[in-house]
Image: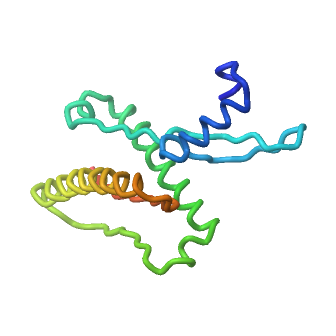
């Protein structure tokens, strides 16, 4: 960021820590440098929400690229969870995967369920942000993933 913005590294470091604290960016890598202190690599935590109409307007190729980016983020979160021992440290984690055989009405119900889950996750995030604003408790970084797609054509 300091290079891209042509700004003082000390100032950028402070702002990066603040952005990370508020969940706007996350640290993904520390690269060694010649001068000793590691270079911190961050990625944005922006939420991209597309309406059904916006998705429909995309080409099949663009939909696949968009989906691949989301899946890469999901896999990065899973990898990090295993690397830091999160799946063994706490017993209250969960994974969801079920291959279902549905009719069109059933698929539509699953699709709508995923939308409701997404809406509820954002509500939970907002409520948590409100509670955390009153405390000094360290935030828990939580990955929540769910997908729905037809596996056959």
| Left or right of residue 11, residue 54 in this image | left
Residue 18 seen: yes
Q: Residue at x 37, y 52 (%)?
A: 129
Q: Nearer the viewer, residue 134 or 146?
A: 134
Identify the residue at the far front of this view.
134
Give above or below for 18 relative to 8. below
Snapshot colouring: rainbow
Give above or below for 113 relative to 44. below
Residue 64 % position (x, y): 40, 39
Q: Nearer the viewer, residue 31 or 125?
A: 125
Q: Residue at x 66, y 31 (%)?
A: 12
| Left or right of residue 79, residue 113 in this image | left
Identify the residue at the far top of this view.
6
Q: Nearer the viewer, residue 60 or 8?
A: 8
Q: Quadrant of the N terminus?
A: top right
Residue 143 % position (x, y): 45, 58
Residue 127 % position (x, y): 30, 55
Give above or below for 120 relative to 21. below
Residue 30 % position (x, y): 73, 47
């Amino acid at each position: 960021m300091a290079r891209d913005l042509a700004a003082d590294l000390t100032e950028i470091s402070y702002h990066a820590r603040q952005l990370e604290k508020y969940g706007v960016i996350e640290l993904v890598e520390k690269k060694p440098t010649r001068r000793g202190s590691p270079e911190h690599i961050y990625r944005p935590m922006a939420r991209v929400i597309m309406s059904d109409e916006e998705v429909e307007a995309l080409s099949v190729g663009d939909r696949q690229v968009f989906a691949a980016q989301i899946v890469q983020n999901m896999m990065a979160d899973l990898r990090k969870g295993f690397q830091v021992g999160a799946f063994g440290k706490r017993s209250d984690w969960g994974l969801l995967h079920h291959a279902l055989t549905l009719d069109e009405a059933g698929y539509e119900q699953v699709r709508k369920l995923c939308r409701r889950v997404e809406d509820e996750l954002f509500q939970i995030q907002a409520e948590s942000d409100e509670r955390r604003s009153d405390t000094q408790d360290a935030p828990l970084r939580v990955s929540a993933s769910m997908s729905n797609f037809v596996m056959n054509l």
